[in-house]
């Protein structure tokens, strides 16, 4: 029995019996997720380690949501509006926005100005909700469980706004070709203002608990650094790119809806590490609040939907379009092709999560210690369903 207890198996499959010497640098494999609390959604990491250091990393996006692009090619144009939000659950509205704008670009559909303002409000509320979710996940990986209790609870206040407006807390199916599905209910604008005031009042507490926490700073400063000279080469976008010192934002560089009529700043950092990426998101919450307040003040009256033909018979003219938005995860784009039928001929989703959650993450994890893997992953803030779309 004692001999069996002393048998050692190394990663190349060799078995070392009692009396045999183990290799000097023995590697071993570790699988983290998807049930591990330090993992995003249905994600998983397959790691090879030497001691506590990661020497090889592979990601596994799981199979919870998949095949969206091919599903869209089998359904009517209007039916797909219920599919696209599931591509990125924490921040679903950019998918609705891109899908609607791609159709509008092909069919030359004009969107009423009031609907454009409402769309911007939805996109920015979704950005705040997504960032609050990211704060909680990042803090949880480091054992600071008070933060997710706070931020996810505060996120629910935004979900309640979505429910009041669209009937759905997570999947809204609200932004449709030609505008939005319904106008704001009575008193909704004031509810939004009250929610923004509440979240703004909580930000100093977030700073004290998370962003100025000395332990959090020691555990995330200098961790998962994206070399600025490699950021563009690797295709990094969004907050992860801005944390490397690049003030790139689709809302300013290629404005859509009414973003060119609004004033807001683009937060950047230069450290390009896990802490810098989260601090950029923290500042973006303030800028989103600023944007929404302007939207509510400037929103004109008028219709919210340019009515389209019967969805069961609607044939979008032949053509193609490429549209993009600035989501909380980074630059988000759709390429759509229509052959004049009642269904899209081709829809391709170009999100940020394949880049951040697979290619960049696998590079950054090499040389990282095992206890830092989760916060590197959460600092990149990818959407696993979008990887296997």
Image (cartoon, rainbow, N blue to C red):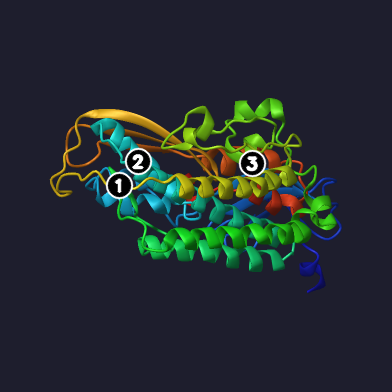
Q: Position of residue 374 (x, y in %)?
A: 68, 53
Left or right for 318, reference 26: left
Label 1 or label 2, whichever lies nearer to me, is 1
Quadrant of the drawing holding the N terminus: bottom right
| Figure quadrant of residue 164 | bottom left
Element type where label 1 sits in the image = loop
Q: Position of residue 174 (x, y in %)?
A: 34, 53
Q: Are marks 3 and 1 in contact (CB under 8 Å)?
A: no
Q: Is residue 210 above or below residue 233?
A: below
Left or right for 381, reference 159: right
Q: CA distance from mark 3 to mark 2?
A: 43 Å
Residue drawn at point x = 35 percent, y = 40 percent: 113
Asked whether residue 8 is in view, the answer is: no
**Residue that badge 3 annotates:** 362
Q: Are marks 1 and 2 in contact (CB under 8 Å)?
A: yes
**Residue that badge 1 annotates:** 302
Nearest the eye: 43 or 230: 230
Q: Are marks 3 and 2 in contact (CB under 8 Å)?
A: no
Q: Is residue 230 above or below residue 332?
A: above
Specify which label sits upstream in the sequence, 1 or 2.
2
Element type where label 3 sits in the image = helix
Specify which label sits upstream in the sequence, 3 or 2.
2
Q: CA distance from mark 1 to mark 2?
A: 8 Å
**Residue that badge 2 annotates:** 113
Nearest the eye: 292 or 378: 292
Q: CA distance from mark 3 to mark 1?
A: 49 Å
Asked whether residue 282 is in view, the answer is: yes
Label 3 or label 2, whichever lies nearer to me, is 2
Element type where label 2 sits in the image = helix
Q: Badge 3: how crowded within 10 Å, few (<14), some, or many (20+)?
A: some
Q: Badge 1: how crowded within 10 Å, few (<14), some, or many (20+)?
A: few
């Amino acid at each position: 029995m004692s001999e069996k207890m002393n048998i050692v198996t190394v990663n190349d499959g060799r078995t070392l019996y009692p009396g045999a010497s183990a290799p000097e640098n023995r590697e071993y494999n570790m699988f983290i997720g998807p049930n591990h609390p330090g993992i995003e959604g249905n994600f998983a990491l397959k790691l090879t380690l030497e001691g506590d250091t990661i020497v090889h990393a592979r990601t596994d996006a799981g199979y919870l949501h998949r095949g969206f692009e091919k599903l869209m090619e089998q359904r009517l144009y209007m039916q797909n509006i219920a599919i696209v939000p599931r591509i990125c659950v924490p921040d679903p509205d950019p998918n609705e926005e891109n899908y609607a704008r791609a159709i509008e670009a092909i069919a030359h559909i004009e969107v009423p100005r009031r609907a454009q303002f409402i769309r911007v409000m939805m996109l920015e509320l979704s950005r705040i909700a997504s960032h609050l979710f990211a704060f909680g996940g990042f803090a949880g990986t480091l054992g600071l469980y008070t933060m997710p209790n706070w931020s996810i609870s505060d996120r629910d206040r935004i979900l309640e706004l979505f429910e009041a407006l669209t009937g759905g807390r997570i999947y809204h199916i609200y932004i449709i070709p030609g505008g939005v599905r319904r106008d704001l209910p009575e008193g909704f604008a004031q509810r939004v203002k009250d929610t923004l005031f509440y979240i703004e009042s909580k930000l100093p507490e977030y700073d004290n608990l998370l962003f100025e926490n000395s332990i959090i700073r020691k555990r995330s400063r200098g961790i998962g650094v994206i070399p600025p000279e490699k950021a563009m080469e690797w295709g990094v976008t969004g907050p992860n790119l801005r944390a490397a010192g690049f003030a790139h934002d689709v809302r300013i560089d290629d404005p859509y809806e009414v973003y060119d009529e609004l004033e807001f700043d683009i937060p950047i950092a230069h450290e390009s590490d896990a802490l810098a990426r989260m601090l950029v998101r923290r500042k973006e919450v303030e800028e989103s609040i600023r944007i929404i307040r302007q939207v509510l003040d400037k929103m004109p009256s008028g219709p919210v939907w340019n009515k389209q033909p019967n969805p069961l018979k609607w044939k979008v003219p032949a053509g193609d379009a490429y549209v993009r938005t600035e989501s909380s995860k980074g630059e988000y784009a759709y390429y759509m092709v229509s052959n004049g039928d009642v269904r899209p001929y081709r829809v391709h989703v170009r999100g940020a999560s394949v880049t951040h959650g697979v290619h960049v993450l696998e590079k950054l994890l090499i040389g990282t210690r095992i206890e830092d893997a989760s916060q590197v992953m959460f600092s990149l803030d990818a959407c696993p369903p979008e990887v296997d779309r």
